[in-house]
Image: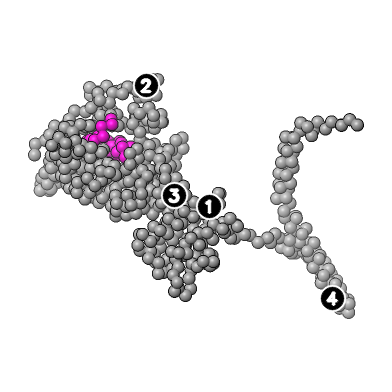
């Protein structure tokens, strides 16, 4: 017997059948949403009818006559009242709607996977939050995890995104080692690869854990809305600081939370020290600061690494010098020390004459040093003084003279920094992947977040004086002559560069129809003359 072929719709119409099922399912869901009130009323009428029948069946036979007479009298009274039948129908519909409402209890606790995660974390914290002679322990093996845990939330992957832990009052939450152990346990059991923020409430014996999202890395260098003497170091978490600034992030505009560093005669943090790992973005930070400082000040740059990252600034208006060699750096910093003394003398004369000393020092002077430790090694090998020793006068008296020093170096050079640098740089920045101990050694306080294994360039922490340690993401400010950088970021930096001084030619920008002319050495500014003391 020959086999009959399948219908064409079953052989070629699989996709059509699937789409038809989806359309039918969508239509059914929509109809259910629209008819939900009618469904509730119908269910309520059925439940009322069932309840009435059960009540009638439970009524003894000798009382049914009186019940019928009472119901008939009520119906007659309702019929004789004005608008009585309408009001009766409305009352019955309302009772049916209330009776037929969806009373499915909403699930308030975690699901099975979330409960298993909380149970595992609870058992992992038992050795740290329990003692043998505690009469009413919050943490015990096999205990109730709902007592110490609260305000928990999970992300789309089922991992903890927020948690509040209540711990015993005897726990030594004032010791950093004990707190670090608890943070490590919570971090490991909640999922690695994310950044966590821990807030210890020692008064209430509570620990709040929150998962932090990544900071935006697409904000490029631009004209930030700041007052004179304010410099945007980067951006931090929303709500971490008390202000926002409008920024252009790609093609969109929004408000971001900046880390603003204030300099000037009334600043409590007149100078800044940035420390990082190779490739962490310290040079990008100095370049960003230089572009902002050139709006109303003069800049001296000492590139100890000699990488030529500041070649685009050489020969620009306001850039007094860009030095890479030892001799030029010594001459430039010696001139800066004499210039600081001159500004102090002029300010003192103005005060003695009874005039304000605000304008006696002229434009603010910024001294930017990138990896000066390299020049220090060269100077020691050549028997010359360390260029960092010439920073004592600008560091000690720079705030009154309108001189600001910004120094960037790597972690292996922190121990060799002079005491004047470590003493007079209360504004600190740490960039790159670093351990908590390294961050605490530079900033003077441990961050409230856990370090992540991989961080983008320009990502780190900042602390201004005795303030809170803030997460930081430096704006993308690459070398405009670096062809490996993004085209949009390079153009943003070129748009912020001042005009070149007379007699300096402008090289072509990368991406303008050809390769960039790498003429950084040709645009080295002349060395400033050393002022007489």
Q: Residue at x 34, y 44 (%)?
A: 431
Q: Residue at x 84, y 72 (%)?
A: 56
Question: Dot 2 surroundings within 10 Å: few (below 14), some, or many (20 or more)?
Answer: few
Q: Which numbered dot is residue 59?
A: 4
Q: Would you place residue 413 above or below residue 131 in this image?
A: above
Report the residue marked by disc 2.
515
Q: Nearer the viewer, mark 2 or mark 1?
A: 1
Report the residue marked by disc 3.
195
Q: Nearer the viewer, mark 2 or mark 4?
A: 2
Q: Nearer the viewer, mark 4 or mark 3?
A: 3
Q: Earlier in the sequence, mark 1 or mark 3?
A: 1
| Mark-to-mark CA distance, 3 and 2 | 40 Å
Is residue 202 found left or right of 266 in the rendered image?
Answer: right
Please, what secondary structure does the residue beneath circle 1 have? loop
Report the residue marked by disc 1.
159
| Mark-to-mark CA distance, 2 and 4 | 99 Å
Q: Which numbered dot is residue 437?
A: none
* Residue span colored magenta: 282-308
Residue in the foreground of this view, choosing between 482 and 339: 482
């Amino acid at each position: 017997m020959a086999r009959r072929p399948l219908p064409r719709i079953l052989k070629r119409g699989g996709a059509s059948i699937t789409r038809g099922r989806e359309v039918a399912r969508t239509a059914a869901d929509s109809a259910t949403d629209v008819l939900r009130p009618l469904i509730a009323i119908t269910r309520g009428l059925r439940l009322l009818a069932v309840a009435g029948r059960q009540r009638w069946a439970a009524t003894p036979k000798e009382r049914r006559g009186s019940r019928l007479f009472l119901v008939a009298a009520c119906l007659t009274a309702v019929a004789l009242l004005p608008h009585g039948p309408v009001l009766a129908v409305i009352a019955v519909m309302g009772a049916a709607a209330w009776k037929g409402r969806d009373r499915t209890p909403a699930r308030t606790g975690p699901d099975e996977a979330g409960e298993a995660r909380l149970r595992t974390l609870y058992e992992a914290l038992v050795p740290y939050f329990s003692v043998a002679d505690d009469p009413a322990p919050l943490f015990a093996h096999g205990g109730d995890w709902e007592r110490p845990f609260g305000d928990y939330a999970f992300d789309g992957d089922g991992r903890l995104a927020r948690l509040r832990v209540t711990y015993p009052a005897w726990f030594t939450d004032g010791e950093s080692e004990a707190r670090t152990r608890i943070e490590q346990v919570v971090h490991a059991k909640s999922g690695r690869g994310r950044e966590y923020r821990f807030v210890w409430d020692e008064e209430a014996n509570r620990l709040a854990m929150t998962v932090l999202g990544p900071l935006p890395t697409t904000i490029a260098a631009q004209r930030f809305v700041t007052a004179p003497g304010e410099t945007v170091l980067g951006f931090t978490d929303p709500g971490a600081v008390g202000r926002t600034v409008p920024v252009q992030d790609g093609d969109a505009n929004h408000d971001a939370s900046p880390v603003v560093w204030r300099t000037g005669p009334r600043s409590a943090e007149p100078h800044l020290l940035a420390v990082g790992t190779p490739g962490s973005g310290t040079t990008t930070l100095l370049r960003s600061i230089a572009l902002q400082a050139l709006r109303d000040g003069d800049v001296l740059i000492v590139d100890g690494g000699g990488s030529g990252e500041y070649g685009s600034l050489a020969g620009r208006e306001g850039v007094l010098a860009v030095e890479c060699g030892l001799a030029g750096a010594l001459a430039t910093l010696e001139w800066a020390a004499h210039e600081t003394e001159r500004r102090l003398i002029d300010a003192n004369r103005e005060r003695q004459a009874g005039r304000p000393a605000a304008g006696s020092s002229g434009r603010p002077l910024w001294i930017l040093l990138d990896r000066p430790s390299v020049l220090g090694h060269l100077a020691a090998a050549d028997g010359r003084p360390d260029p960092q020793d010439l920073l004592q006068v600008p560091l000690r008296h720079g705030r009154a003279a309108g001189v600001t020093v910004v120094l960037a170096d790597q972690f292996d050079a922190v121990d060799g920094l002079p005491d004047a640098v470590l003493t007079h740089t209360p504004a600190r920045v740490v960039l790159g992947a670093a351990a908590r101990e390294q961050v605490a050694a530079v900033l003077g306080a441990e961050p409230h977040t856990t370090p992540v294994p991989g961080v983008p360039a320009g990502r780190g922490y900042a602390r201004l004086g005795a303030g809170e340690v803030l997460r930081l993401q430096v704006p993308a400010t690459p070398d405009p002559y670096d062809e490996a950088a993004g085209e949009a970021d390079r153009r943003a930096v070129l748009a912020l560069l001042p005009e070149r001084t007379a007699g300096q030619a402008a090289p072509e920008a990368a991406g303008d129809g050809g390769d960039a002319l790498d003429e950084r050495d040709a645009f080295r500014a002349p060395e400033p003359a050393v002022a007489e003391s």
